[in-house]
Amino acid sequence: MKQLLQWCVPRSIDHAKREELLATAGSILAGTGVIDTSLRTLATEMSTSARMLVYYFGSKEQLILEVLNRQQRATIPDTDQVARPVSVAAHRQWCLEDWRACTRGERSDTLRIVLQVFGAACGRDSPYRGYTWETLSLLTRNSQARLEALGMPTQVAQTRSRIALAAFQGFIIEFFTAEDQRYVDDTFTRFVDEFLLAPFVSPDHDQGKALG
């Protein structure tokens, strides 16, 4: 009877083991790809079993979402916690540093997974749809908050933020696939200077205004 009860009581989750699995999965998925890697293949690469991954995460899709949520918590703040720039020069420097972190720094592996998930989210009934929309919305709000802190009107800041986010995804894809990555670096810098932080026309149609 005692043995039967032991079989019936669910094992408690080993949270340290779970975190270890998430960290390992994130590193592997950045190299092998999200779409073409089965749960069994992923388990083999992680030196564990598919059954173990199912026990901790339920499915490959849920594992991927857990990987992204874990990494997002460490890199993307909620809008009310966003550090506002004190000047255009400071925000320009932040944009360039963020670009470097995303393309060749500590966030590059995460971005390789994120962009694949964003693409997969376009499928009908995709399990990634909710995550993708929530992440894009948060990034847009954060960018808008930074631009508004520089004196940009809400409507202009929102429009530029949405366009900038779409462009940023394209630039990242170009960087990861281009033979000459310096060209993409230069294009991104011009985009920041000539669009994101360029003088704007206010909604009341006054003449163009430079950011302060």
Image (cartoon, helix red, strand yellow):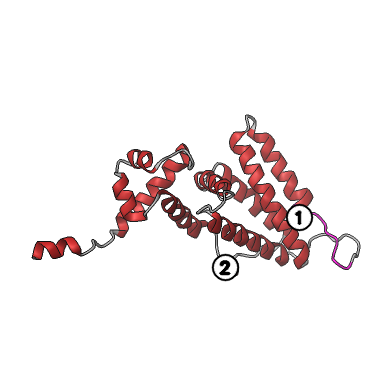
Please report contact status of discs 2 and 1: CB closer than 8 Å, yes or no. Answer: no
Badge count: 2
Amino acid type for the residue under numbered disc 1: Leu
Element class at badge 2: helix
Residue lying furthest top in this view? Answer: 179
Residue 203 falls within the magenta-colored stretch: yes
Residue 50: horizontal and vertical position, in percent? 32, 45
- The circle drawn on residue 81 is 2
Q: Which residues are magenta?
A: 196-204
Q: Quadrant of residue 103?
A: top right
- The circle drawn on residue 156 is none
Examine the rendering and report whether any part of residue 152 can be seen. no
Residue 141: horizontal and vertical position, in percent? 65, 63
Mostly what secondary structure, the magenta segment?
Answer: loop
Q: Earlier in the sequence, mark 2 or mark 1?
A: 2
Q: Quadrant of residue 129?
A: bottom right
Element class at badge 1: loop
Residue 40: horizontal and vertical position, in percent? 35, 41
Which residue does the numbered mark 1 point to in the structure image? 197
Residue neighbourhood size for the residue with mark 1, other residues' Cα within 10 Å, grouped as few (<14), some (14–19), many (≥20): many
Amino acid type for the residue under numbered disc 2: Gln
Residue neighbourhood size for the residue with mark 2, other residues' Cα within 10 Å, grouped as few (<14), some (14–19), many (≥20): few
Above or below residue 189? Residue 179 is above
